[in-house]
Amino acid sequence: MSGVAATSSGAVAEPGAAPVSHPLDVVEAVLGRVVDVAAAALLLADILLLGWAVTARYALNIPVTWVEEAATLVFLWFGMLGVASALRRRIHLRLTFVLSRMGPEARQRTERLAHLVLLVFLLKLVVPTIALIELNHIVTSPNLGVPGSVPAAATLVSITLMAVFLLIRMWREMTKSAFALSVAGAALCALALELAPPFLADLGNLNLLLFFGLGVMTLIVIGVPIAFAFGAATVSYFALTSDLPLTVIVGRINEGMSHFILLTIPLFIFLGIQIQYTGMARAMINFVMALIGPARGGLSYVMLCAMYLVSGISGAKAADMAAIGPILAPAMKERGVRDGDTAALLAVSAAAAETIPPSLVLIIMGSVTGISIASLFVGGLVPAVVCMAALAIAVYARSRGERRGTDRRDLRVIGRTFVIAIPALALPLIIRAAVLEGVATATEVAVIGVAYVAVVGAITMRGVSLRRLGEILVETTALTGTIMIIIALAGAMSWALTQSGFADTLVAAMRQLPGGKVTFLAVSILAFVVFGSILEGIPAIVLFGPLLVPVAQSLGVHPVQYAMVVLLSMGLGLFSPPFGYGYYTACAITKTSPDEAMWNMVPYLGALLAAIVLVAAFPWLSIGFL
C-alpha cells in the first residue's frame, strides 16, 4: 500500500507522522527502565557499602561484621534483576551456529520452539519458588535478622519479569492465534510436568544420557540460552525421574548466586568498563605501540602485550577485545598484515590470556572447586607468559613479508606516552600485588581498583559523568546477570549429576585411564577444548571443575596446575571456529568475515596448543612461585 506504513498494532500511520507505539512496547520500555534503574541503584549501593567496609577496616581499624551478609543479599537482588534485564536485551549466551545456517522460515519456527521451552521452564519454577519463600520465612540471617524469604523473593521477581519480557517478545513475533496456542501449550506442559509421576525412573542411568546429554545438546542447538538449557534439563530430570520437590532446585539456584566471593565478578566488570571509558586502556596501548610498534610484526606484538595488560584488569574477554581491536585493526591493515590475520590473533591472544589475574574464570574456578583464589592468581601469570611467547613465535614466522613501521622509535614519544600511561600501568600492579601479597581479598582489591580509577581517571584523564555512570552500572548488572545465571543453573545441573551417581562413575573412569596422570591430562585437554567450544567457558568450569579437580589430585596433579591446563584448554575451544563464540566476537570487532579469518587461526591455535602441552608437562610453570 503506497504512502502508508502499518504499525505493530495493526493501525495505519499517516505519511510523515510519528509511528504509533504498541501498548506492549510502552509496557516493556517502562518496566525495563524500572528494572535497570533498580539494579543499577543496588549495584551502586553495594559498591559504596563495600568501599565503606574497606575504609573502616584499613583506615579506621574497625571491623564491620555484617557487611558481608548485607552485600551478598544486595548482590543476589541486583544479580537476579540483571538476569531479567539480560533476557530483555537478548544477551544471554547461546549457540547460533546452527540457527544461522537455517532458512528464514525454519529459523523462525526454531526460535519459537526455543521461546516455548524457556516459557515452560519459567512457569514450572513459579510454584516451587513460592513454596521456598514460605519455608524460609521463619529463618533469619545471623547478623541483620533478615527473613529467609527475602533472598528467595528475588528469584520469584526475576522469574516473573523474565516471563513478562518473553511473552511480550512472543507477542511481537507471532500472530495472535499462534501466540495463544503457544502460551496455552506452555501452560499445559508445565502442568503436565507437575502432575506426571516419575515414570522414567526405571530407565536408571539412561536418563542421564536422555536429559543431560541428548536433551541439553538439543536445547542448545535450537537456540535456548545455554544457562536455561541446563535449567530446563535439570527440572525435567527431577520432575520425571524422582519425587524430589523442585523447591530443592530453586534453593540450589539461590545458593549458587549467594557466595560472597562472586561479588568480585560485577566489581571487575564495572572496573573493566571504567578503564575503557576513562582512556586508561588506550593509554597503555599507545605506550606499547610507541615502544615496539615500528618493528616488523610490531603491531602484532603490541596486540599480545596489550592483551596481557588489559586482560589482567577487566577479566571479561569481550571487553578486552573491544578495548584493543578497534585501535590496532586499522593500523595493522595499513601495515600489510594478512586479511583475517588480525581477527585470528585477537581471538587466540584472548584465549591465551584466560589465566591472567584477576580473570573472572580464575575467580569462578576457585569458588566452585575450593582452590585458593590467591594461589590461582599467582599460578596464572607464568602460563600466560608461555602462551604469549608461543604466539609471538608464530607472529615472527608469519610477519617476515610484512612492512616495518614508517616511523623509527622516537624516545620523546615513548617518554610522553609512558608518562601518560603511568596511572594505567600502575593499576594491574596494584591489583596483583595486593592479592598476591595477601594484603586484601579479591573483592576488596576490586573495590580499591574501582575507587582508584574513579579518582585517578578523573584527575589525569577524563572522568565519568553521572549519565555515563548510570549506563555503566546498567551494563554491568546485565552482564553480571548473564554470568550468574550460568553459575547458578550449571551448578544445579552439576549437583543433579552428583546426586545421580554420575560423578562417581566419571571419577572412577578417569582414574582408571591407562597411563596415569599423563593420559588424564591429555584427555582433560581434549575434553575441555570441546566443552569450551560447545558449552562456552563458565558452564564447563562449573559443571566439570568440581568433579575432576579431586581426580587430578588423586593422580598426583597439583590442583593449581590442573586449573591452568583446564582454563587454557577451555579458552582454546571458546575462541576456535566453528562453534566458539569468542571467535565470532573477534571477527565482529575487527570487521572481518569469519570465513576469511578461519584458516588464519590454524598457526595461532597450533602455537597455543603447544603452549598448553608445555604447561601440562612442566608443573613448575604453574606452581613454581606458590
Image (spheres, rainbow, N blue to C red):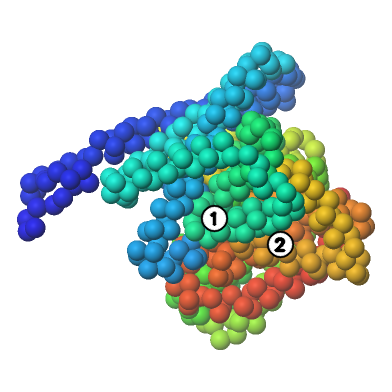
Label 2 or label 1, whichever comes before in sequence order? 1
Q: Are marks 2 and 1 in contact (CB under 8 Å)?
A: no
Residue identifier under label 1: 219
Q: Residues within 10 Å of mark 1 (few under 14, many from 20)?
A: many
Which residue appears farthest toward the bottom when viewing the image? 401
Instruction: Identify the residue shown where x is 65% and y is 45%.
Output: 199
Instruction: Identify the residue shown where x is 72% and y is 25%.
Output: 58
- Horizontal side, residue 408 vs residue 110: left or right: right
Residue 128, horizontal then vertical, whole percent: 59, 30
Residue 232, horizontal then vertical, whole percent: 57, 46
Residue identifier under label 2: 528
Q: Secondary structure at mark 1?
A: helix
Q: Secondary structure at mark 2?
A: helix
For badge 2, the amino acid type reads Phe
Residue 13, horizontal then vertical, whole percent: 11, 46
For badge 1, the amino acid type reads Leu
Above or below, 391 against 133 in this view is below
The one of 46 and 552 positioned closer to us in this rendering: 552
State whether residue 123 appears in this view: yes
The one of 350 and 552 positioned closer to us in this rendering: 552
Which quadrant of the rendered structure holds the N terminus?
Answer: bottom left
Residue 530, horizontal then vertical, whole percent: 67, 65
Which quadrant would residue 56 be assigned to in this image? top right
Q: Residues within 10 Å of mark 2 (few under 14, many from 20)?
A: many
Instruction: Identify the residue shown where x is 57% and y is 64%.
Output: 580
Above or below, 536 against 399 in this view is above
Q: Which mark is residue 15?
A: none
